[in-house]
Image (cartoon, helix red, strand yellow):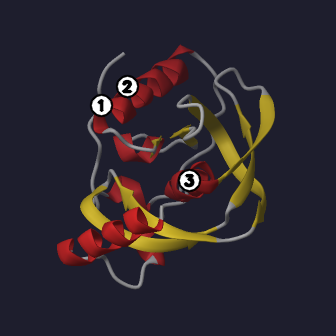
């Protein structure tokens, strides 16, 4: 395994629609393993292949409940219900945060690293991460959903309110 460089906003990779994965081989497995190591090192919630410069429909998401990595190859959202609004950031937009509304429950159909199809449903932060990472595969960033990016003061105030609400 190896750490991969995370590309940042302005890199053309982040604006392109990714091609489907058609070969489930050691190269894909290496990419997924490298992405997992890179995600762990960056302390993120998810990572999509274009964020490491690979234009393929593959992403990984950290399951917020089990702390396990969920690998999604050629994913598509098949069902979404409810709404949640919360703070969101992105490893490709470092230091920037915004408030985004996403579905609260998301069901995804995807393939695993060996090509086997499966469906998975999650809620809350993991559902948010599913949406965020799958959008990367279509050349979109979370900042398209925010009215404005939070200033440091607004971020501090938002986090303080969240803490008080718990």
Q: Is residue 4 visible?
A: yes
**Residue 107 vs residue 162: left or right?**
right
Which circle's residue, 3 or 1, is located before the other in the chain?
Answer: 1
Residues at discs 3 and 1 in contact (Cβ within 8 Å): no
| Quadrant location, the N terminus | top left
Crowd band around label 2 with a 10 angstrom C-alpha radius: few (<14), some (14–19), many (20+):
some
Question: How far apart are the two marked residues, 3 and 1, measured between alpha carbons?
Answer: 19 Å
Does dot 1 land on a helix, a strand or a loop?
Answer: helix
Q: Nearer the viewer, residue 106 or 35?
A: 106
Q: Nearer the viewer, residue 106 or 160?
A: 160
Q: Position of residue 34 (x, y in %)?
A: 40, 24
Q: Quadrant of residue 101?
A: bottom right
**Residue 128 vs residue 54: left or right?**
right
Task: State the residue position of label 1.
Answer: 41
Question: How far apart are the two marked residues, 2 and 1, measured between alpha carbons?
Answer: 6 Å
What residue lies at 38% left-to-right and 72% top-to-bottom?
Answer: 161
Task: State the residue position of label 2.
Answer: 37
Task: Please identify, in this view, whether the residue under mark 3 or under mark 1 is nearer the observer.
Answer: 3
Q: Position of residue 70 (x, y in %)?
A: 60, 33
**Residue 131 vs residue 27: left or right?**
right
Task: State the residue position of label 3.
Answer: 125
Q: Quadrant of residue 131?
A: bottom right
Q: Quadrant of residue 117?
A: top right
Q: Identify the residue at the far left of this view.
A: 152
Q: Is residue 141 visible?
A: no
Which circle's residue, 3 or 2, is located before the other in the chain?
Answer: 2
Residues at discs 2 and 1 in contact (Cβ within 8 Å): yes
What residue lies at 59% left-to-right and 38% top-to-bottom?
Answer: 65
Task: Please identify, in this view, whether the residue under mark 3 or under mark 2 is nearer the observer.
Answer: 3
Q: Identify the residue at the far bottom of this view.
A: 147
Q: Position of residue 103 (x, y in %)?
A: 67, 66
């Amino acid at each position: 395994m190896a750490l991969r460089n995370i590309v940042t906003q302005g890199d053309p990779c982040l604006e392109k629609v990714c091609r489907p994965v058609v070969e489930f081989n050691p190269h894909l497995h290496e990419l997924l393993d490298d992405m997992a190591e890179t995600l762990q090192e960056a302390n993120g919630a998810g990572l999509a292949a274009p964020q490491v410069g690979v234009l393929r429909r593959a992403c990984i998401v950290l399951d917020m409940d089990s702390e396990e990595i969920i690998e999604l190859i050629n994913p598509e959202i098949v069902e979404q219900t409810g709404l949640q609004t919360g703070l969101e950031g992105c490893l490709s937009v470092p230091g920037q945060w915004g408030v985004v509304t996403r579905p609260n429950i998301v069901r995804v159909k995807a393939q695993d690293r060996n090509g086997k199809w499966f469906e998975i449903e999650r809620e809350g932060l993991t559902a948010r991460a599913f949406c965020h990472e799958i959008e990367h595969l279509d050349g979109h960033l979370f900042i398209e959903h925010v009215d404005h990016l939070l200033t440091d003061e607004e971020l501090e105030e938002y986090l303080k309110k969240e803490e008080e609400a718990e």
